[in-house]
Image (tube, grey):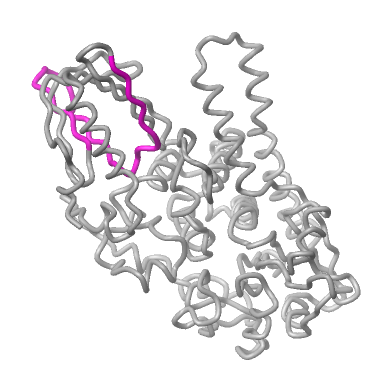
Amino acid sequence: MEFAELIKTPRVDNVVLHRPFYPAVEGTLCLTGHHLILSSRQDNTEELWLLHSNIDAIDKRFVGPLGTIIIKCKDFRIIQLDIPGMEECLNIASSIEALSTLDSITLMYPFFYRPMFEVIEDGWHSFLPEQEFELYSSATSEWRLSYVNKEFAVCPSYPPIVIVPKYIDDEALRKVAMFRHGGRFPVLSYYHKKNGMVIMRSGQPLTGTNGRRCKEDEKLINATLRPGKRGYIIDTRSLNVAQQARAKGGGFEQEAHYPQWRRIHKSIERYHILQESLIKLVEACNDQTHNMDRWLGRLEASNWLTHIKEILTTACLAAQCIDREGASILIHGTEGTDSTLQVTSLAQIILEPRSRTIRGFEALIEREWLQAGHPFQQRCAQSAYCNSKQKWESPVFLLFLDCVWQILRQFPCSFEFNENFLIMLFEHAYASQFGTFLGNNESERWISTNILDVEFLM
């Protein structure tokens, strides 16, 4: 497919751009395969370059011969274009809608982008599991690198190399994978050098209504315990939700089979609930008619801060179990790709100073989100303005960044970066010239595409 086939009108003159907090600008509007560009000859005005992939929704209005297109972006910006001529306006709107809804990964801008700067480091090989393992190997000999997932044969959402207990062989890992949702068997997420305790993460066990068990699974997670020590299983779902999952073949660890583990249930909401919360929050932010009391009421009704509180509370619980109680923990929800990653990441930010540096935070995003299989393409396909029916969209990563911001506001001197870094990550997760957040997992990025042909953000 050629992009030119989707562009009905490539250029329109005398278009007026309106943006909040900026004066109106008149210029020439151009459409390319990946950008909407507005260029003006007025002094001291910058060109507008907007990625089509950053467009969440568009509205059209007509007053006589003048057409207006209101573009709502995934990064929450709203811009207005006044276009002379109804036909031109309809053609531009139709072209934008077609170009902003392309599904194929290989048609995305990162595969066409060529940087105008020197690339000083290959980001695709900057944060490898082997490097992370080296940081732990000096403090413990109880873990090993496993290549059981080579070519993604066991779990498509895991990387080819994972860190597992030393005395659990690959055949046992394959059996455990068949017992865990999506093949996501327990793997090492974090090793606390202070006392040797660990955070592991996985998908839910597939116990079902018959109480199915897997002795290899029990042996694997027990291998993380010290003699005489108990561990904690933090299930990010409420007990009621976890019990409902049993009827669908999922479930949770039975106390009779895991006597050395105490199970704790939290109530972090599923992805579709979080998306509804984001929509309500952005609607409240864009409503300029309400007073302070009404604004606070709408903010509370969105439940956004409630979600923040629940995620941070769970992360603090995990950190306390590791550091204060000296107990290892296993964290999972249902799939293990959303709330699980929020909690494991935030717990490490609380416990590990390295995660609060720029380089350490980049490594954390790579390890706990990209390699751990968070489905960025599904979750970030739409933002808060999309008019179509929700599918898999959810601000899971944005909520995580907001939680980091909450900690940053309380302890600004404990971080090497500020909120601008978090905002940049949010913007690039939804629309970017880099390939860092493409696809839903490592398998899609490495097998389905020539991912090494694109540039890496971090």
> In what quadrant of the picture does the N terminus appear?
bottom left
Q: Does the magenta stretch include residue 39?
A: yes
What percent of the width, then of the height, locates residue 247? 79, 64
Q: Which residue is drawn at 20% across and 46% down?
A: 6
Q: How many numbered markers are drawn?
A: 0
What percent of the width, then of the height, locates residue 450? 28, 69
Left or right relative to 75: residue 28: left
What percent of the width, then of the height, locates residue 410? 61, 34
| Image quadrant in which you'd find residue 407 | top right
Front residue (pair 307, 34): 34
Q: Does the magenta stretch include residue 179?
A: no
What percent of the width, then of the height, locates residue 84? 17, 18
Left or right relative to 79: residue 341: right
| Image quadrant in which you'd find residue 60 | top left
Write down the region rendered in magenta.
36-62
> In what quadrant of the picture does the C terminus appear?
bottom left
Q: Residue at x 35, y 45 (%)?
A: 431
Left or right relative to 131: residue 270: right
Residue 278, compared with residue 141, is above or below; it is: above
Front residue (pair 42, 246): 246
Front residue (pair 283, 258): 283
Residue 135, compared with residue 55, is above or below; it is: below
| Image quadrant in which you'd find residue 15 | top left
Q: Residue at x 28, y 20 (%)?
A: 68
Q: Which residue is drawn at 22% across and 32% down?
A: 92
Residue extending farthest left: 41
